[in-house]
Amino acid sequence: MVDLKIRILHVEDSADDQLILKRSLKENMPINYELVAVDTGTKGLNSIEKENFDLTILDYRLPDMTGIEFVKQLQKKHIKIPIFLVTGKGSENVAVEAMKLGVRDYINKEEIGSKRLVEGIKEILLESSLPETVDIETAKAILALFAKKSTIHIESTSTLASDPESEIPAEQLASTLKILAEMKILEEEPSRSVIACPDCTSVTSTLILECPECESTQMTKEEALEHFNCGNIDFRSKYDKGEGSLVCPKCGKKLKVIGVDYRKIENWYRCSNKHVFGQPNFKFACSKCGGRFPLEETRIEMLHNYNLTDSGRQMLKLGVKATELTEKSRNKTSSKKT
């Protein structure tokens, strides 16, 4: 399964404050994370441009710029990333300005070693929580797919595969991809139109042939012959007596000259109930509900290809982690009640 570590960038010029944060996260952070520290705003901006981070903890006073200038530089580059601003005591006006620019939360520098910062990080993650319509294990399987390739091509749900050890149904993966596309986590591109079941809308179906008389799906196909003299029509194998000799199985007369005694009829079929016919009925059998339907009754659905952008990867990863935190909190609450 893909690594779901949260990557945190700490932009802070004080080595002491870097160490305090490192110890605080180690003691209080409830999820896996990777902490990267840089000591200038320029290094921080370069790191965000070159690497994928899920959260930035930003000191307001840096050697080369302020935290506000840092945020404005990100906006100019059209880069979106959750930011936690660290300000000095009595800097409420700075914090208000930063929040107006899109900073998600802030704390005073004295609180950087407290649980307050970790709780704030958890709140940011929870804001990115996936909706209840998205199963957490399915979201993880989709992340695993995108870890192997940049695009998921769906020819049909039967060809959509996740991790070999995953037992998640392919149709569940496909429906979740659609939900994530609606949430703008994925980019959705039309691929091709397919037939869908008119009853359950599944796009996983098999083309079947049916006997026009009894609807049997068991049949054989062979070249047929028509004997002009008695009007018998049957498969060539029924006439063939070996060594090129053809004898009518109905009247027993020998067929000698094609076009005079008999003619060839191509593409004839015989079903398991011995009905002979020139053209079977074409139907589709739904793999999900088992229903059968002709082409004129089908629904037409569009299949899509899905791409995960860098920002989408961050959103999905945060959503997975946030949902895990939510589930852990619920489990703890349930345990206390019992």
Image: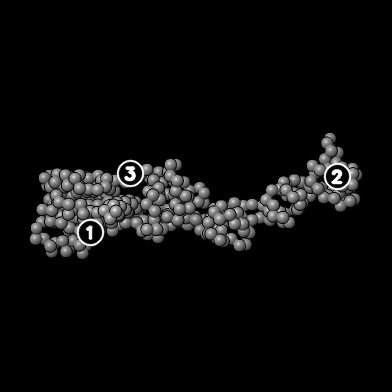
Q: Are marks 1 and 3 in contact (CB under 8 Å)?
A: no
Q: Amino acid at mark 2?
A: Pro
Mark toward the start of the polypeptide (3 vs 2): 3
Residue, x 30% and y 57% (percent of image)?
Answer: 128
* Location of mark 2 (residue): 249
Residue, x 21% and y 55% (percent of image)?
Answer: 120
Q: Quadrant of the N terminus?
A: top left
Residue 276, position as x, y percentages in the image: 77, 51
In the image: residue 137, left or right of residue 275: left
In the image: residue 217, left or right of residue 124: right
* Location of mark 3 (residue): 3
Quarter of the rendering containing residue 72:
bottom left
- Residue 104 got which mark? 1
How far is mark 1 from mark 3, CA to CA? 25 Å
Q: Nearer the viewer, residue 230 or 189?
A: 230
Mark toward the start of the polypeptide (1 vs 3): 3
